[in-house]
Amino acid sequence: MDYSPQMKNRIKRIEGQLRGILRMMEEGKDCKSVVTQMSAARTAIDRTMGLVVSANLVNCVLESEKCDQDQQKELIESAVELLMKSR
């Protein structure tokens, strides 16, 4: 699967958020601020995961058009399984 520049940029932003959280912990910042930033990072990961999963689903459906019925079923089941893992 090809990952879009948008997906990669989101991951880089999340990486920066995580480094910031670690720095906050090392500096002894208050719990509320750290947890707020952790929540923001989790939300960013969830949204990015949604983008990746939806792109995978589209890819699987497009690929399934080129396959026989058994292969179509496997591709779609694989996409659905990935969707379930992301929740």
Image (cartoon, rainbow, N blue to C red):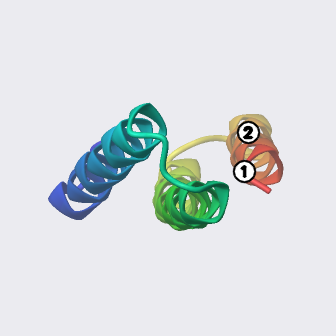
2 up-or-down from 83: above or below? above
For the point 65% across and 64% down, the residue is 32
The residue nearer to you, when weighing 10 against 19, is: 19
Furthest residue to the left?
Answer: 5
For the point 20% across and 56% down, the residue is 9
Q: CA distance from mark 1 to mark 2?
A: 13 Å
Check disc 2 and give the amino acid type.
Answer: Ser
Secondary structure of the residue carrying tag 2 is helix
The residue nearer to you, when weighing 57 against 9, is: 9
Q: The C terminus appears in which quarter of the rendering?
A: bottom right
Name the N-terminal-most of marks 1 and 2.
2
Q: Is residue 11 visible?
A: yes
Label 1: how many Cα within 10 Å (few below 14, some 14–19, many 20+):
few
Check disc 1 and give the amino acid type.
Answer: Ser
Q: Which mark is residue 86?
A: 1
- State left or right for residue 19 relative to residue 56: left
Residue 29 % position (x, y): 48, 51
Residue 79 % position (x, y): 69, 48
Secondary structure of the residue carrying tag 1 is loop
46 up-or-down from 86: above or below? below
Label 2: how many Cα within 10 Å (few below 14, some 14–19, many 20+):
some
Residue identifier under label 2? 78
For the point 41% across and 46% down, the residue is 24
Residue 52 % position (x, y): 48, 55
Q: Residue 82 is drawn in which quadrant?
A: top right
